[in-house]
Image (cartoon, grey):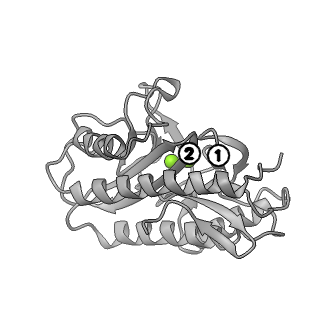
Amino acid sequence: MGGMRRSPDEIERMRKAGRVVAEMHAATRAAIRPGVTTAELDRVARDVLERRGARSNFLHYHGFPAVICTSPNDVIVHGIPGPYRLEEGDIISVDCGAIVEGYHGDAAFTAGVGRVSASAERLMQVTEASLWAGIAEMEAGHRLHDIGRAIQEVAEKAGFSVVREYTGHGIGTAMHEDPNVLNYWPGRPGPVLKSGMPLAIEPMVNAGGAATRQLDDGWTVVTADGSLSAHFEHTIVVTDGGPEVLTLAD
Ligand code: MG
Ligand code: MG
């Protein structure tokens, strides 16, 4: 199924939500340092939502207890903020979302805590580059799975692997709408991209193998082999002038 096309008025509301998400990123990024707990990062993000009068699309989502996901080291996605204290050399993924005037934004980044290893730095750089390679495919007339093909090529050329079980998604009046945005080439091109279609693109890239495992908390997804994982995401809309990233700061 193809993605929904949104009107200019709807896209304008999504820009507002996206700006709140960008502010959550800036605030949590600035708070990342050794000794800070992931619960404290959640508090920082909550403060932004409250200050902007935005609602959380993460809190209570299928019972999720926080407004962000915090996923350190071998955690791929969906880590729950809590007592874990960041340590020098960790990498930490922060996934944030917001609802403004009924429209959703969703974006994630991974950052180092203090000084990190060269291999961790490279994993983060490659994962972010794979996201931007996917974004560059968001042109009217391109096909949906051109995005995943571009992401996979960047990640695998670097010797890393892309997670298959979790994907990007359409986004608009719900956080997760059709279609799923794969981070790999599934052997067929998928639907044609059209102006006005918003998508959340979110490569999850592992330093080792692609296999995943979910912990007993029912949320936290880790790499099966214990290797590091990075995650970057933006909410983007196809326009006649190319991709417009909605979750960047002004
Ligand atoms: Mg997200
Ligand atoms: Mg998402």
| Left or right: 46 in relation to 33 | right
Image quarter hosting the N terminus: top right
Q: Position of residue 179 (x, y in %)?
A: 74, 47
Q: Is mark 1 within 8 Å of ligand 2?
A: no
The residue carrying pointer 1 sits among few (fewer than 14), some (14 to 19) or many (20 or more) residues within 10 Å by Cα, namely many
On residue 226, the disc is none
Q: Residue at x 57, y 71 (%)?
A: 132
Snapshot quadrant of residue 240: bottom right
The residue pinned by badge 1 equals 172
Classify 10 Å Cα crowding around label 2: few (below 14), some (14-19), many (20 and above). Answer: many
Q: Which mark is residue 104?
A: 2
Quick check: can you spot residue 175?
Answer: yes
| Residue 41, position as x, y percentages in the image | 27, 45
The reply, left or right, for residue 24 in relation to residue 145 is left
Rendered-image quadrant of the C terminus: bottom left
Q: Indicate the secondary structure of the residue bearing disc 1.
A: loop
Picture coordinates of residue 102, whole percent (x, y) = 57, 39
Could you tell me the amino acid type at mark 2?
Answer: His
40 or 133, which is in the foreground? Answer: 40
Query: What residue sits 85% from the left and 61% below the top?
Result: 192
Q: Nearer the viewer, residue 218 or 53?
A: 53
Considering depth in this image, is 68 or 101 the residue closer to the camera?
101
Q: Position of residue 220 (x, y in %)?
A: 43, 35
Q: Check the image and report above or below for 3 versus 140.
A: above
- Asked which secondary structure carries label 2, the reply is strand
**Residue drawn 77% across the image and 48% down it:** 4
Q: Is residue 248 left or right of residue 94?
A: right
In the displayed orientation, state which residue is furthest to the left: 35
Callout 2–callout 1 Cβ contact below 8 Å:
yes
